[in-house]
Image: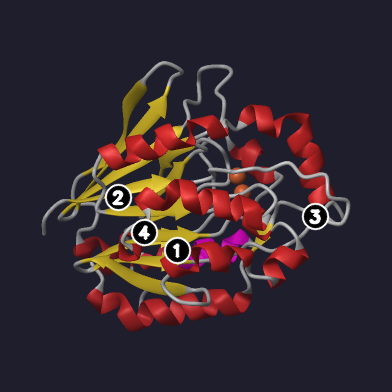
Amino acid sequence: MAAFRIAHLSDVHVWKTTFNPVRLMSKRIVGMAALMLGRARRFRLDRLEHLVEKVESIRPDHVLITGDLTTTALPEEFEHAADALAPLLHPPGRATVIPGNHDRYTGASARGRHFERAFGRFAGAAEFPWMRFIADRTAVLGLDPTRPALSARGRLPAGQLAAARALWEEHREAVDRLIVACHYPVDAPEGLRDDLEWKRLEDSHFLAEWLTALGPHLYCCGHVHRAWAFTPPHIPDQLCLNAGAPLMVDRKGDNPPGFLEITLDDTDVAVVHHGWDGSGWVERPMAWREGFFDLARRREARPSGG
Ligand SMILES: [Fe+2]
Ligand SMILES: [Fe+2]
């Protein structure tokens, strides 16, 4: 198998201020207030074009975007995001895009399927969960635990998890390299767990239990605006990858905004973070796992009788 390069982005958070009182009804008023209070200063839309150029420069074979493309799920925000990211999304088979909680910000935006209208063609199917092959024996399994709610917490419906289990059982023999794409992480590295706690995935232990039985897999997420590569202690065969928020201002200098370059070379996985330090791009190796996708490891992980 030839090396396959994935650019993983997340949490772009395109925003647009609006003072239309009808639109400010409902939860959006909370988001708009937060925007006024600082999000506009924290997410630098003027850097979006520069970001897209940098992602293109690594010549990815596939681009994976794990949600929160917008801030309050306005059609104008989706339009702006789709236009700005267009160079990365062509042809559509080269890109996979899943929603984040901000892309389902209000009941109206979820019912109106604003996300699907803008980015639905970069999904594996019209409804979650789905699985799509992006390279030889390499598949992305998409999950969607987002919902319009006052809380930022997500919830994966039991039916969606059951369908994901069935999907995996149906295709597992055809997959050597599995990538689970889900906006919400199930765990965060030590020191970042408090950042996740207030906006975590509710009942995540059900998902974690299934993931533990999957064997080796990458779990690409966002939601917590920090780039990381780590293995949750209770899911030992997972390499959890968070791309961070690529337009966020890094005031302290300890969280450079950027994206991940994931290289799959046969059974090996290498992850490099490309971060903007205010004056240039800095590469930071985040993970190197030789033989990560060795199928013998999956057989070991298979639960007895399974
Ligand atoms: Fe976010
Ligand atoms: Fe989020």
Mark 2 vs mark 4: which is more N-terminal? Answer: 2
Residue 53 placement (x, y as % from top left): 35, 37
Who is closer to the viewer here, 147 or 193? 147
Q: Which mark is residue 257?
A: none
Q: Which residues are magenta?
A: 204-211
* Left or right relative to 227: residue 299: left
Q: CA distance from mark 1 to mark 3?
A: 28 Å
Who is closer to the viewer here, 170 or 113? 113
- Which mark's residue is nearer the viewer, 4 or 3? 4
Is residue 69 visible from the viewing direction of this image? no
- Which mark's residue is nearer the viewer, 1 or 3? 3
Q: Secondary structure at mark 3?
A: loop
Q: Residue 47, relative to residue 265: is it above or below? A: above
Q: CA distance from mark 2 to mark 4?
A: 9 Å
Q: Which residue is mark 1?
A: 211
- Which mark's residue is nearer the viewer, 2 or 1? 2
Q: Which residue is mark 3?
A: 150
Q: Which residue is mark 4?
A: 95
Image point (45%, 59%), residue name? 97
